[in-house]
Image (cartoon, grey):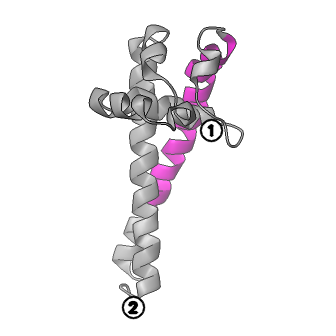
Amino acid sequence: MNEIEDTLLTIGLIGLFFTMILYVLFGQVTVRKLRKNKETKDSLGIEFASGWDILNVALALSRPKWLEKRIMASPTAHFAADAKVLYQYTNRFDRILGRLFSFFSLTTTLMLLALALADAVGLFD
């Protein structure tokens, strides 16, 4: 491993650490109260694995309105969380926390996948 690879891996792992903290925090603060609410319980999207609804809610709170309209008009709308309902039952802190978690999750995942691909191709040799 060379110096740039070590630096990128360190940045990615630090981002992954913050993502894990935000995942637990967002799940406990926001999604927990949404699961308990009868009006929002069915609006969290399909849960493929335990905790998947946390990702659904974070992505629903962070995507633009034009994309939300398109997703809700598609035949696969029941897979995604309904942002219109979620906005009614969340406050500004919940939305900011969801957007932070979504941002860190996507950027860290893409960065680590790009690093693994670059290493597999032999870019760092």
| Residue 49 percent location from the top left of the image | 70, 43
State the extent of the magenta-drawn residues as a range. Answer: 10-36
| Residue 113 percent location from the top left of the image | 45, 66
Element on which disc 1 rests? helix
| Residue 14 percent location from the top left of the image | 47, 53
Q: Quadrant of residue 21?
A: top right
Q: Residue at x 58, y 32 (%)?
A: 54
Going from N to C along the chain, the mark reached first, 2 or 1, is 1
> Which residue does the numbered mark 1 point to in the structure image?
52
Q: Residues within 10 Å of mark 1 (few under 14, many from 20)?
A: few
Element on which disc 2 rests? loop
Left or right: where 55 falls relative to 42: left
C-alpha separation, residue under disc 2 versus residue under disc 1? 37 Å
Q: Residue at x 35, y 33 (%)?
A: 70
Nearer to me, 49 or 79:
79
Is residue 30 among the parts visible in the rendering? yes
- Which secondary structure dominates the residues rendered in magenta? helix
Q: Is residue 13 magenta?
A: yes
- Indicate the amino acid at tag 1: Trp
- Indicate the amino acid at tag 2: Asp
Q: Residue at x 42, y 48 (%)?
A: 106
Q: Residues within 10 Å of mark 2 (few under 14, many from 20)?
A: few
Q: Is residue 14 above or below residue 89?
A: below
> Which residue does the numbered mark 2 point to in the structure image?
125
Q: Residue furthest bottom?
A: 125
Nearer to me, 16 or 84:
84
Q: Is residue 58 above or below residue 121?
A: above
Foreground label between 2 and 1: 1
Are the residues flagged by discs 2 and 1 in contact, CB closer than 8 Å? no
In the rendered view of the protein, which quadrant contains the C terminus? Answer: bottom left
| Residue 39 percent location from the top left of the image | 60, 8
Q: Residue at x 48, y 31 (%)?
A: 58
